[in-house]
Amino acid sequence: MKYLILVFFIFIFYSLGSALYYMMKDGDGSKRMVKALTMRVGISIALFIFLLFAFWMGWIKPTGVA
Amino acid sequence: MQSREEYYVPSGSYWPIVGSIGMFALLGGFAGSLHGSMAGTVGMILGFGIIIFMVFGWMGQVVHESETGDYNLQVDKSFRMGMAWFIFSEVMFFAAFFGALFYARQLSVPWLGGEGNNAFTNQFLWPEFKSVWPLIQMPDASNFSVPKGIIDAWHLPALNTITLLTSGATLTWAHWALMNKNRNQLIGGLIATIVLGVIFLGLQVSEYMEAYQHLDLKLTSGIYGSTFFMLTGFHGFHVTLGVLMLIVILMRCIRGHFNNERHFGFEAVAWYWHFVDVVWLGLFVVVYWL
């Protein structure tokens, strides 16, 4: 289940990275950057909801003393 | 190829030396304050004040040059390149601290506990030591502040995650407003983002007070305390800078500096805020929870 978190992060990095690319490459009138950032926010919120659910269901156990 | 006349050469500026003095006072004062020096603490606060002054002063000068039409396409490209290198240095900065956490957590602490081919290391050094992360039962605690516990991820840190994620959403809302020429939504979205950023910082301060006063979790609590405060503390500095930059962008939006065709300053600050948001998500998962 922890690997699923990694998958979420790969998508987050991809959308953040593509927003950076569009910021550098496109003219200011382009909407590609704001679309990529919207995607970034959406996936991040989805990840947090997943973490909350995984914690509630006991799918992911923290290591150590927590 | 562009002719020489097309490249704007700015006049001499004193802001770099002001920034250097501020950085020197901040870091020198911080080092002094770690040794219990009152002068160090004063120098640190003074340095922080000088840096804030420099940020607003320098940005103000650049904004003025931009608004008076000094900048052309070539300068615009320079700003974009500058932002790219700044982002690269930021990614490397956080990669180094996340790397330090990974090294301690996955490699060096388990080695002391005898993992890999290190059974004799464990036997010779601290045979009673069991490797557990977060490392609050140190093999030799005589020189460290031993924490009574750790910050529970699903209390204040979870609330902070919600705060920062919401701020990412309000900033994106403002970004769409800029693209769609909706001025009120743009200003409202930016104000909401700034307020959420300040709330985040306030919660972070109360978390640190809880850690220091009730849990004895300090910068001196061994490798766990060091990595915890280095990562979350530097992230907090980034949020502080992000809030300052958002305030500048808000002022510029109120004055009507940007439109849906020309707004690189807004884009650069927005991207920075999203980056800081993603770093926090990483911290929430690997520092606070797992």
Image (spheres, coloured by chain):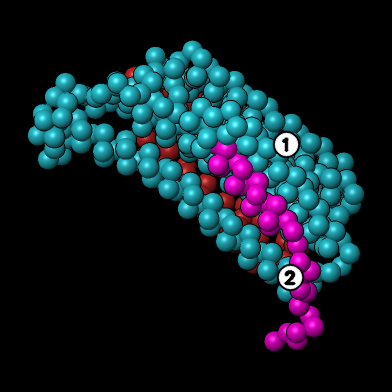
Which tint was used for chain A?
A: red
Give percent across and percent down for residue A5.
43, 38
Q: Eyeballing the image, is B109 above or below B100?
A: above
Q: Residues within 10 Å of mark 1 (few under 14, many from 20)?
A: many
Return the residue at label 1: B193
Q: Is residue B20 magenta?
A: yes
The location of residue B101, given as percent across then percent down, is: 38, 39
Q: Nearer the viewer, mark 2 or mark 1?
A: 2
| Quarter of the figure with residue B142 | top left
Q: Which residue is mark 2?
A: B75
Residue B132 falls within the magenta-colored stretch:
no
Q: Name which residue type carries label 1.
A: Thr
Q: Is residue A58 left or right of residue B270?
A: left
From this view, report whether residue B145 is shown above or below residue A48. above
Q: CA distance from mark 2 to mark 1?
A: 29 Å
Is residue B140 rendered to the left or right of residue B262?
A: left
Residue B9 found in image quarter: bottom right
> For the magenta stretch, what is the residue range?
B1-30
Q: How many marks?
A: 2
> Callout 2, which amino acid?
Val
Chain letter, disc 1 residue: B
Q: Nearer the viewer, residue B5 or B43?
A: B43
**Secondary structure category for the residue under label 2:** helix
Q: Which chain is cyan?
A: B
Q: Nearer the viewer, residue B132 or B181?
A: B132
Q: Quadrant of the N terminus of chain B?
A: bottom right
Q: Quadrant of the C terminus of chain B?
A: top left
What secondary structure is the magenta-colored segment mainly? helix
Q: Are marks 2 and 1 on the same chain?
A: yes
